[in-house]
Amino acid sequence: MASKNMSTKLYKSISKVYDALDRMYFTSGGRNPRELIGEMIQKDKAKVLDMCCGTFANGYVVACNKPDAMVVGLDRSKPMLRKAKQKVEDKGLKNVKLICRDATNTGIKSNTFDYIIIGLVLHECNPDLWKAILSEVKRLLKDDGKLIILDWDIQESVRGKVKFSPLYVCECLVTPKYFKEYYYCDKRIFFADYGFELERMERCDVTFVASFKKKTMESEKKNMNNSKEKHSEERYLEETQMVNYRADSIQKLVEKHGWKDLGEYDRIGAVYDFVRNDILFGYNASDLLSAEEVLRDGYGQCNTKSTLLMALLRAVDVPCRLHGSEVSKYFQEGATSGLIAKLAPETIAHTWVEVLFKGQWIALEGVITDEAYVQGVKSRCPDENWDYKGYAISVPSLNDLNLDWNGADLFVQNTSVVKDYGVYESPDGFFNEHKQTWSKLKDFAYIHYGRKVMNKNVARIRQAV
């Protein structure tokens, strides 16, 4: 989030037009999210906090619909609160209290509220503010209380992208890194990390509204006891921020292909073949993409394809884990070249998936390179029968390379491993310890230039067959 001084000036300048923007995006199509919030608050005599309330757009609807409820609006912007006060007075509302305070330190008694609303706030925050605000929310909510979140939703249709694009650009200019991290994350997992469990989510044109229940010490203790009773392999079926297999796009894909109806051997093979050949080999902007984001890209390399493969395997109840390592950069020659190859670090973070099948862990590193790409490399190097390293392939024999699922280990880059980090339950854990470090300049050059050149090289190799 911008500094307090910057954000104070910003909200002072937009307070006069804030409600006009609200009308433009919330009443021009689809359900009005403010009204949906009102529906989610079911108790007639509830105590409700509209946190970071701005001009009190959310709390105002609740106060009007629930005259017996007590609705508190809290914000640190005095210009916003003046607009809120004017609306409350014009309507003659008697069940409203407006407070000028910081959301991270409200000074309000613990366990006070039945509902806390946070609307269009968290996408502007950094991790420190996420933690501070949501910790305060958890303190203020009653044990059976509900957190209601209204925020921008990911746009998939052309119409939605066009409509949301001005706001997307503005938000990216203010907090580019953390806005994108929050905007594209799986909200169920995001809020679970801060002690809230998703109960309901509704989409409203460019926004979503979600209701979460507070995880109490009793429920956490119960979850811990249940966790201890799990079979050891079940930890390899859990969802994480990156392996977000409950995402709509992942679930729809699994249902479309009917993978759950297959036997275990065929199930693994079908998922492996999809990620290998339908998600083409190519270089993404980041190793830290979620499975849903890799699927959206439609291409990937070792780390990103591994994330998607894990998500799809876990979505069809196949236990899997991640094997982490570092590889030498030199076997990538051909896929990379020139200045790009020279600027790359000497060793590169490298992962592959291991699947549990018939009591054995089987490596599925072969998922990285699609068959069309492999054939393209073979056509360029027809007589490579010995130790081969090039074009992002590193194997004992290129000519003998067969990466079709057969129930045994499948490797395509492992002979260039220079450091082995062992196994991890998820890519989240691996990259928390072994994230690839670049200078900001190299990172920018890779995202906006280097990977695009590399992807063009890969496409040419694939088309050479």
Image (cartoon, rainbow, N blue to C red):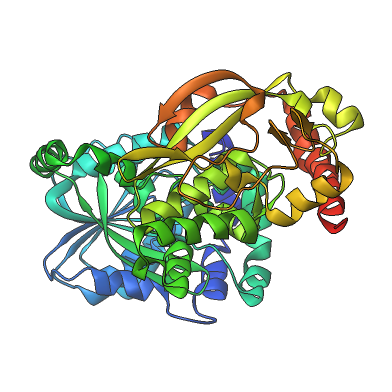
Q: Is residue 164 left or right of residue 258?
A: right
The front one of 456 and 194 is 456
Q: Position of residue 344 (x, y in %)?
A: 77, 25
Q: Residue at x 43, y 71 (%)?
A: 203
At 32% from the left and 46% from the top, the residue drawn is 358
Please tell me how many numbered marks the rendered image carries.
0
Name the quadrant containing residue 261. Answer: bottom left
Vertically, is 41 above or below 450? Answer: below
Considering the image in quadrants, where does the C terminus appear? Answer: bottom right
Which is nearer the eye, 137 or 349? 349
Residue 57, how many percent across, how many down? 40, 65
Residue 175: image quadrant is top right
Q: State left or right for residue 144 relative to residue 125.
A: left
Q: Is residue 292 above or below residue 32?
A: above
- Left or right of 146 on screen, residue 52: right
Q: Residue 17's spot in the image, x, y percent?
A: 58, 64
Inspect this view and state whether residue 123 appears. no
13 relative to 336 in the view: left or right = left
Residue sticking out furthest to the right: 338
244 above or below 70? above
Q: Residue at x 74, y 49 (%)?
A: 374
Q: Nearer the viewer, residue 323 or 453?
A: 323
